Image (spheres, helix red, strand yellow):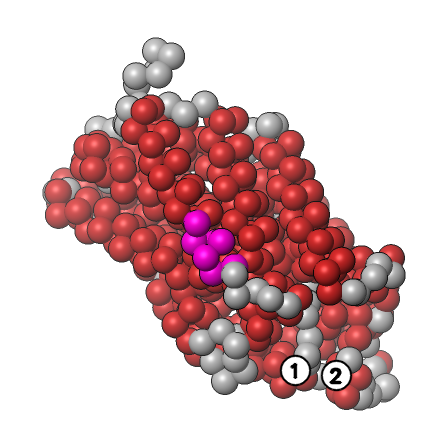
Amino acid sequence: MSDGVITLLDPRLGWALLCLFGLLWVFLGWYWGRRASSVDDFLLAGRKVGLALGTATAMATWVTSNTVMLAPVFALEKGLWGMVAYSTASFGLFLFAPLSRRIRTLMPEGHTSGDFMRLRYGKWAWYLFLVISMVYSVAWLVSMGTAGGKLMETLAGIPYFHGVTSILLVCVIYTLFGGMYAVIGTDFIQSAIILAGVLLVGSLVVIRTDLRALYDTMAVEQPSLINALMPVALLSLFNNMFFGFGEVFHNNVWWSRAHAMRAEVAPRAFFLSGLLWFPIPIAAGFIALSATSLGVNVIDPNTVGPLVAGQVLGKVGAVLVFVVVFCSLASSIDSLLAATSDLLLQDLGKKILGISSEPSRFRLYSKFIIILLGFLTWVLCALEMDLLQILFLSGPLVASAIWPIIAGLYWNRAHWLAAVLAMLLGSALGLWAYFQIGWYTASLISSVVSMAVIFVSVPFCRQTFDWKKLHE
């Protein structure tokens, strides 16, 4: 009980768990961060991450608080296709596997996704790409902070802003200690906890739920949720799939991991991480579908997952969800802080503003940017925006970058003007679709428009690109 509101956990237990895991991640960040003796170590973990750590960090980064919270919302609103729709985000990791091999071949000493856009397409495509990347990265950070604050409040009565502040403070501190080394090291443990926790909760819900009663209840009260031809659900499936492609293909979180892993390891690590991630939204979605038959009163769809877990499993389920959510938050926020600071430092700071690349100063600048990003996220989280609105509004932007990146990596006649037009028109028409039709069409339309621009430009592209220019 907290301020008259019934919660699944006693607030004292919630604060104890928050402090325990917060201190654990800070300690582990310091412990692994001791290996970051150079700037390259701090930014890219020395470019020698192996298969186990590479797979774990990619999987843990992709299991965000949005996975734990929005996957159940998809299932609750779109039914069976909604569960599958969120799982299609794993396809982005599958397809990034061969792209990571190509990236390492073309750019053996590369640092960021911005490096590629600048060297491959020139400054105008690069500037536009940086804007898209920064908007998306901030949206992702804010969505995770907001989700974490809401869940802490729902589960344990921890005031929303206190929860947000605690989570961001922990992530900023241990990322400052060791950069990518600290991020990847903590991700390894977090990935194991997330995978075991979600699958355990999902399995226990299945065991304790009468599946026949669940189906009969849905058939009578919510027949649209088991309709295989539900148009909106089918559209959301393809929309989410292309949104996932755009998220992974463009974001420096994944490019930095491709550069951090050993060249021969990266493709296998991304493919395995996709396999491990795929069942998690389905497990989370099934938990939500059980709500009606279990008689759970869902006031806020964003909290349906923890409410059902608490109803079925009691305090044990609530503790499991709390731990999984905290791990998923930390594993994604730390990755974004490290990768986004790298992008800003390398592209905006070094290439545009011309700051000093002297190692000690460079590392100091990186830490300053991490703190600044954490503070910006904290301020924006105060607005308590809707999770779907925060995340999916950026969908058309990132989806527009899919085809310029693919064409730029594999086709030596891809032209800078085509890339710029593909991102501009794709983003513009995707945003129009978001407001005029619905969020479930925005990324799909953006990616189709971007693809059309790239392919229409084929007959007009005569100049060939020298791949050696990427070996900066």
Query: Image quarter for residue 257?
Result: bottom right
Q: Amino acid at mark 1?
A: Pro
Nearest to the observer: residue 402 or residue 116: 116
Q: Which residues are magenta?
A: 27-33
Residue at point 27%, 42% (across, down)? 320
The secondary structure making up most of the magenta span is helix
Query: Horizontal placement of 300 versus 424: left or right?
Result: left
Across and down, in percent, residue 115 comes to 74, 70
Task: Specify the quadrant that holds the N terminus.
Answer: top left
Across and down, in percent, residue 69 comes to 41, 41
**Where residue 466 is drawn, which disc sits there?**
none
Query: Horizontal placement of 434 versus 61: left or right?
Result: right
Q: Residues within 10 Å of mark 2 (few under 14, many from 20)?
A: few
Say if 173 sits above or below 237 in the image. above
Query: Image quarter for residue 456?
Result: bottom right
Query: Image quarter for residue 188?
Result: bottom left
Residue at point 73%, 65% (across, down)? 359
Say if 237 sits above or below 264 in the image. above
Query: Horizontal placement of 41 versus 369: left or right?
Result: left
Tag 2 residue: 471
Sequence-wise, the earlier of marks 2 and 1 is: 1
Residue 344 showing in the rendered view = no
Please tell me whether residue 422 belongs to the stretch shown in magenta: no
Tag 1 residue: 108
Across and down, in percent, residue 139 comes to 62, 44
Say if 383 sits above or below 242 in the image. above
Check whether the beta carbons of the residues at disc 2 and disc 1 lie within 8 A of each other: yes
Please tell me whether residue 30 belongs to the stretch shown in magenta: yes
